[in-house]
Image (cartoon, helix red, strand yellow):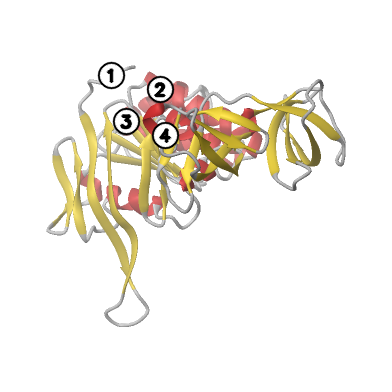
Amino acid sequence: MIIDNNPIHLNIDGIHVGYPGAKYGSWNPVVNGLSLQLRHGRIGCLLGPSGCGKSTVLRAICGFEPVSAGKITLDQQVVSSPELTIAPEKRRVGVVFQDYALFPHLSNAENVAFGLRHLSKPEALKKADEWLARVGLPGIGSRYPHELSGGQQQRVALARAMAPEPELLLLDEPFSNLDVDLREKLASEVREILKANGATALLVTHDQFEAFAIADDVGVMVNGQLVQWDSAYNLYHRPATRFVADFVGYGVFVPGVTQAGPSVKIEIGELPLPQSSYGLPGEVVDVLLRADDIVHDDHSPLQAEVTHKAFRGGDFLYKLKLDSGQELMAMVPSHHDHAIGEKIGIRLEVDHVITFAKNESARMTA
């Protein structure tokens, strides 16, 4: 276990954010009692579906939206509370927007130098060229944004946000305008840039693979609430709620019954449970089976029909159906190219058993 002793840079304590409703005196809550902590040098991510409130959290951190309850602290200084709102320009927070917001009439170097008004123009342009080199774009300072690819424009926007050396960098859906194949690659490159510069950053996205590629800490949001703030590994293998289990990764819930083993019996086998999470025999539960819990095995007597498949490069993501009608998912190496309607052999290979009581979010994991 790695213990991070860096001080807490961003502390969000039970904030509520909302907007006036259409009717006089009405109020539309967007963020409800959200709390999280982000340490110096860490990269955090708020992950969730559209409309869950994650971008509103960023706007509150920037100072663009007031909080109606709770407080936001940057480096032990309260910057937002119901009684106090520090102006955005005094928070030393940099922002990379979804649409990059580059000025088309300015060169790339001039775009990066835009926020360096405390320096003379030659000094600002020199520093801009240094930052363009630091994000992997040396020698393009005299060119213009329209002459660059989307990924290159995103790096220019990143250089512009980081050039004033903000204490916190915020990224709002920074890769959503890029091709799917480029997103994860660029996210990994941005992570390397941020880590090399010791930056503390928080981004929002709806793409879990993008989140996992860039972030140290990931928080899953739904309906204005943060339901789990954790490592990507724990979100996948130790989800705190049924929503997190369903939202992160590929998988399905299958019915099971607890046994005296302790174990849980499902249609295609029996899985051990830890004593600490075991209830009484005969309890009906839902068991989460990830796509990587189902292994393709030509020699297995257990057969399932391929009903759908999606090519993932090195793998196929298969949707399978048992004779009972129960659906499963399996990630299978792509050299096993089976046709829709074909039956294949499968077997269970589960390292982490995740179960949920019926209609409850409490979990049990091994």
Residue 50's place in the image compared with 241, above or below, is: below
The alpha-carbon separation of the residues under discs 3 and 1 comes to 17 Å
Choose mark 1 or mark 4, whichever is in front. Answer: 4
Choose mark 2 or mark 3, whichever is in front. Answer: 3
Side (left or right) of 140 relative to 18: right
Residue 97 location (% of width, % of height): 44, 46
Residue 200's disc number: 3
Residue 109 location (% of width, % of height): 45, 33
**Marks 2 & 3, CB-CB < 8 Å contact:** no
Callout 2: SS: helix
> Residue 267, can we see it?
yes
Choose mark 2 or mark 1, whichever is in front. Answer: 1
Mark 2 or mark 1, earlier in chain: 1
Residue 122 location (% of width, % of height): 34, 29
What's the residue at 78%, 25% (across, down)?
334
Mark 2 or mark 4, earlier in chain: 2
Residue 130's disc number: 2
Q: Which residue is mark 4?
A: 278
Mark 3 or mark 1, earlier in chain: 1
Disc 4 residue type (three-letter):
Tyr
Choose mark 4 or mark 3, whichever is in front. Answer: 4
The alpha-carbon separation of the residues under discs 1 and 4 comes to 30 Å
The alpha-carbon separation of the residues under discs 4 and 3 comes to 40 Å
